[in-house]
Amino acid sequence: MRRPLRILVVSDDAQIGRWLQHRIEALREDCALALESYVAFERRLATSGTEEFDALFAVLGFDREDTAASLAWLDRIKGAPGSPQLVVVAEDGDELCAVQCMRRGATDYLPRRLINAESMDGAIALCLESRRRRTAATPAARKRQQPEAVLHSTLKVPRDLIPRYMLLDTLGESVRATVYLAHSAALGRNVALKVSRVSENDEPQFAREYETVGAIRNQNVVDIYDYGMHEGREFIAMEYFPCGDLKARLQNPVSTDEALDYLRRIAAALSVVHQQGVLHRDLKPPNIMLREDGQIVLIDFGLAKAIVNATRSTAAGVLRGSPYYMSPEQAQGEELDGRSDIYSLGVIFFEMLTGSKPYLGATAVEVLQQHVTAAVPVLPPELQHYQLLLEGMMAKLRDDRFATTDALLEHLSRLAA
């Protein structure tokens, strides 16, 4: 029987330490945990060391007063003989803190307020894999030639499906591709790895997305780190967002002020994309990701196309995109320009304000017909102040909408004033 993964939780706040300990115990049965304060941990370092543990979960603060001390502590224990895998559980951190921790040897970085089963399981899986490799590297282990331990995960594919990436979990699937949570040792971070299914007849799917995003290079557009082919599978490695997407955020109520703030941020991101001559064409909550610092990031440019005197939305009559967020002209296969993305943003705005989609139907065709023929949805009486704004985005005729995202942003500025 495989021995448990031995984890030491270090926290000066006993309540947080116990909370973290209980979260791990509730998630995994193959872990043995201990809890210590930093004073006790320093004493351990000076005497017995930490070799008896496989992983160290350290709760560190990253506000203005604590960041320097936390990074200095990481520098001091970095590379110590027999050091276990280090997972930073961060208070008040941001993306920059995550990068700084990874550079100092952290195996993973978990914002405490955003910890969920998926992120915790991914961090533990990394620690387990590291222990397996360390054990396999010893002469005794090589002589025994024991079969590889199976990590706790929902994965049904080899963890080394794509070289240089260790698959941790499945984030999403479609007919043509699967998106995995994966770890890149070269980058020292987790990434979202999209892998196509093997098909001799398919042309490369991700090349255009790689080229499109690479040409934009903006903080409001997803970072793409790698692209390639391996054994008939196309893959693309991109930024992973532990905070999740707008769709998940909309599972809880959004205040009017929050909805307006999201609208402004998404419009600003779209403005950057449009200024680069690109239409998104698939704007919807799952394609709007959230960073810890409040930034929104647009992802999934698989349907994006260049704006060259407008662009047709389909080829050979095939509609692509989400029916719930599709503009009337896109639903009819007409030529598109930036106002199609503005319409999709209007649908998202209505959903943020009301908690429901404007048009529903038993089939995709019914929903598309409503985008084309139904009246612009009417907001509840308490939200009537924003009806004109909504109509400026969701007008059936594109000439009646905001001409550009910059015009929309200017209107939002006047509204705020």
Image (cartoon, rainbow, N blue to C red):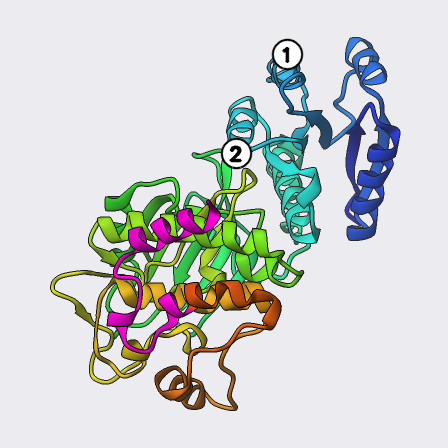
Q: Residue at x 79, y 31 (%)?
A: 9
Residue that mark 2 sits on: 95
At which x and y percent is residue 317? 24, 85
Between the C-alphas of marks 1 and 2, the distance is 22 Å
The magenta stretch spans residue 412: yes
Give, as a single range, the part of the protein colored magenta: 391-417
Q: Residue 409 got which mark?
A: none
| Residue 405 position in % (x across, y down) | 31, 55
Residue at 64 percent across and 63 percent down: it is: 251
Picture coordinates of residue 126 (x, y %)? Answer: 61, 41
Answer with mark 1 or mark 2, whichever residue precedes in sequence: 1
Q: Residues within 10 Å of mark 2 (few under 14, many from 20)?
A: some
Where disc 2 sits, the SS reads helix
Question: Residue 113 location in percent, x, y?
Answer: 70, 42
Is 171 on the left or on the right of 55, as rendered? left
Q: Residue 204 falls in which quadrant of the image?
A: bottom left
- Compared to residue 231, the image places residue 62 above or below, namely above
Q: Mark 1: which secondary structure?
A: helix
- Residue placed most toward the observer, 87 or 66: 66
Residue 237 visible in rendering: yes
Q: Could one spot residue 197 in this view of the protein?
A: no
Q: Are marks 1 and 2 in contact (CB under 8 Å)?
A: no
User: Viewer-proximal residue, 363 or 223?
Assistant: 363
Quadrant assignment, res 59: top right
Q: Quadrant of residue 138?
A: top right
Judge left or right: residue 214 versus residue 25: left
The kind of residue tagged 1 is Arg
Residue found farthest to the top: 46
Compared across the picture, whether 358 is left or right of 223 comes to: right
Q: Does residue 34 appear to the left or right of 205 in the view shown? A: right
Q: Which residue is mark 1?
A: 76
Name, please, the residue furthest toward the left: 309
